[in-house]
Structures are given as C-alpha cells and as structure tokens.
C-alpha cells in the first residue's frame, strides 16, 4: 500500500483517495454541538450557517482540503520532506477530520490554516538573510488574524516566538515589528466594533476557556485514548526517522523540526489541559504529525512491512473512532 501511494502515479492518487473515503465513510452529522468557546467574529460566522447545516459541512470539508493542499505545497516548495507525493494531502485530510465535529467549520481548523501560512513565512526566514521586515510583518498580521477566529491561538504565540528565535538570528526590532503588526490587527478590530456600537463584545476575544491543571478525564472516552496512543507511536517513529535516519533531510529542515515539535507540544497541552473544545482541538497536533509521518512513509529505506503495519493501524484507529462515536 505504502509503495503504491508514494509512487506519484495515478494509481497512488486513486488509492490515496480511497483511503481517505474509507477512513471517513462512517461519518455521521452531529445533532448537538459540544460546548465550544467561540470568538465574537467566529460566532457571527457560525450564526450565518444556522439555517444551512449542510453548507456548514460542505465549507468545513472544503476548508480541510484547502489546508491539506496548502500544506503539501508549502512542504514541497521548501523541500521540507524527502520527496513529493500525495502522502501529505492524505495524512492531513485523514487526521484533521478525525471526529465528526471537525467536519464543520471550527476554530481549530481556522487556527491550523493560519499556522500553515505562518510556517511558510518562517521557512522563508531561513533563506532571506538580512532585512526580513516584510516577513515579520506578515507573521504578526497572521497571528493577529488567528486571534480573531480562535481563542486557542494565544497559547501558540509564545512558542512561535521561541521558534523564530531558534531558526533566525533575531533582533529586538524584528520581534517588536511582529508584535506591533499583531496589535494593529486587534486595534483595527476594536475600532470596527466601537463604530458599530458593539465595543463591549470586543472584550470577549480575550475571555478564554479555563485550564484544568489536574487533568479532567471525565470528557475522555476509549476512542480518544486509542487514537491518541496510535498518533503518539506514529509521531515518535516519524520524528526519530526525520531527525536522525533520513539521509535526504537537509540541515535546514532538521533545524526547523524543532519548530514543528513546539507546535505539536502546545497542541497536546491544549488538548490535555483545556476543559472544553476537545474534539475540535485534536486537530491542532495534525500539522507536525503530518510533516514527520509524511517523511517517514515516503522514505523507501527501512522496514516496508512496519510502515505498512503502522499505516493500516492508523486507518483502523480512525475507523474505530467513527464506529464508536
């Protein structure tokens, strides 16, 4: 199976699409949404789809496909993975739509979209050399926009700043420019809400879901543990291979692997410690998992039977989540 998909031929694309369909074939619409914390802007967006639930699902699926295609393009253009194939698109689509709630437009999906754009700019930082002011402005603007659609974006900001420090010889002026552009986005948003007479709603952007530092297991189910353990195993094998065993991985991308690791870490922390939004926020770990797993599965060296086994177990875990929903 792995060998066919990474062949880059028509057969690999068709098989990849079949795998995606099989992993999602047991999807059922969610009659009642779980308690979710929306930003005012995202709440207004969701309200516009109340009368058209099917439109919400269609747009949600198209948005996941857009992110999968965008991530595939970014990884290919920056040569992050060892080769080009359909794997990135397949893995991202499978994992970003694990739970039925994720098939609808949701804050985590918007946050992933902006994170992919930010990752693209951060990769460009390693090549641009001096005077990267425009890129820092882009990153700051994208961070500000992500805050308008997802409250969880606030947890990623410190880790993104750490990632920038790791991959780029920064200066205080660059970081200040990044933060200023984020502030400008929020300032313009505040002005708009003031002009339309709803400035009191602007404060809701900064009312966050409470964190439970004692780990509340009551909202976890067997399907969550099964999937989490599978993803941890795949992530571990893929990361070790990415960093130490793949001869085609460049020093540039190995250095950037720490950024993907930070994104994965904060995604896991948000899932574990946040009391709400669990089924949506599972998608926040998908970007780094997709990057590492794509590199692992695409590499022709290594045990083919082990890779096929892990891939099949991953598909069966996704199906199990749908069957036991």
Image: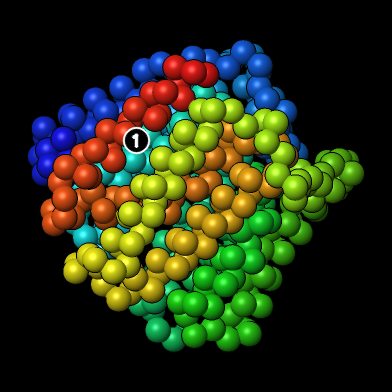
- Return the residue nearer the eye: 139 or 270: 270
> In the picture provided, is 257 more to the left or to the right than 160?
left
Question: Quarter-wise, where is residue 230 in the image?
Answer: top left
Residue 46 vertical placement versus 198 (above, below): above
Residue 312, how many percent across, how many down? 27, 33
Vertical arrangement, residue 41 with respect to residue 59, above or below: below
Asked whether, in this view, residue 246 is left or right of residue 141, the answer is left
Q: How far across and how far down the image is residue 18, in percent?
A: 24, 25
In the image, taking residue 194 as reference, residue 256 lies left or right, namely left
**Identity of the residue drawn at 67% across and 70% down:** 179
Asked if one can make out residue 105 in the rendered structure from this viewpoint, the answer is no
The answer to whether residue 42 of the structure is visible from this angle is: yes
User: Which residue position is annotated with label 1?
Assistant: 314
6 or 312: nearer the viewer: 312
Tally of numbered tags: 1
User: At 72% from the left edge and 64% from the top edge, which residue is drawn?
Assistant: 183
Where is residue 56 drawn, in percent x and y?
55, 23
Q: Residue at x 42, y 23 (%)?
A: 320
Among the 4 quarters of the image, the one containing residue 184: bottom right
Q: Quadrant of the N terminus?
A: top left
When the figure is inspected, residue 308 is found, relative to residue 176, above or below; the finding is above
Seen in the picture, residue 293 relative to 159 is either above or below; the reply is above
Mark 1: give few (<14), some (14-19) or many (20+) Cα within 10 Å.
Answer: many
Q: Residue at x 26, y 72 (%)?
A: 250
Q: Position of residue 162 (x, y in %)?
A: 57, 72
Residue nearest the viewer, comparing 265 with 38: 265
């Amino acid at each position: 199976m792995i060998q066919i998909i990474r062949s880059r031929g028509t057969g690999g694309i068709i098989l990849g699409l079949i795998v995606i369909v099989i992993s999602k074939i047991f999807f059922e619409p969610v009659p009642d949404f779980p308690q979710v914390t929306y930003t005012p802007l995202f709440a207004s967006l969701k309200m516009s789809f109340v009368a058209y639930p099917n439109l919400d699902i269609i747009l949600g699926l198209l948005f996941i496909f857009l992110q999968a295609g965008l991530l595939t393009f970014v990884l290919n253009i920056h040569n992050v993975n060892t080769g080009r194939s359909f794997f990135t698109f397949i893995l991202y689509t499978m994992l970003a739509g694990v739970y039925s709630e994720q098939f609808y437009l949701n804050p985590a999906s918007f946050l992933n979209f902006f994170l992919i754009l930010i990752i693209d700019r951060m990769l460009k930082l390693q090549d641009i050399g001096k005077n990267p002011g425009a890129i820092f402005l882009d990153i700051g603007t994208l961070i500000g926009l992500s805050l308008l659609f997802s409250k969880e974006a606030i947890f990623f900001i410190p880790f993104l700043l750490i990632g920038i420090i790791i991959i780029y010889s920064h200066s205080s002026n660059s970081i200040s420019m990044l933060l200023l552009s984020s502030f400008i986005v929020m300032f313009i948003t505040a002005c708009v809400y003031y002009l339309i007479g709803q400035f009191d709603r602007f404060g809701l952007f900064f009312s966050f879901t409470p964190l439970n530092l004692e780990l509340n297991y009551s909202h976890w189910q067997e399907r969550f543990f099964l999937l989490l353990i599978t993803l941890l195993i795949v992530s571990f094998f893929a990361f070790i291979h990415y960093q130490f065993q793949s001869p085609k991985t460049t020093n540039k991308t190995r250095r950037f692997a720490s950024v993907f690791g930070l994104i994965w870490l904060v995604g896991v922390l948000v899932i574990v410690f946040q009391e709400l939004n669990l089924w949506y926020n599972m998608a926040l770990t998908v970007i780094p998992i997709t990057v590492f797993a794509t590199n692992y599965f695409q590499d022709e060296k290594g045990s083919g039977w082990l890779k096929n086994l892990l891939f099949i177990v991953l598909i069966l875990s996704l199906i199990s989540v749908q069957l036991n929903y």
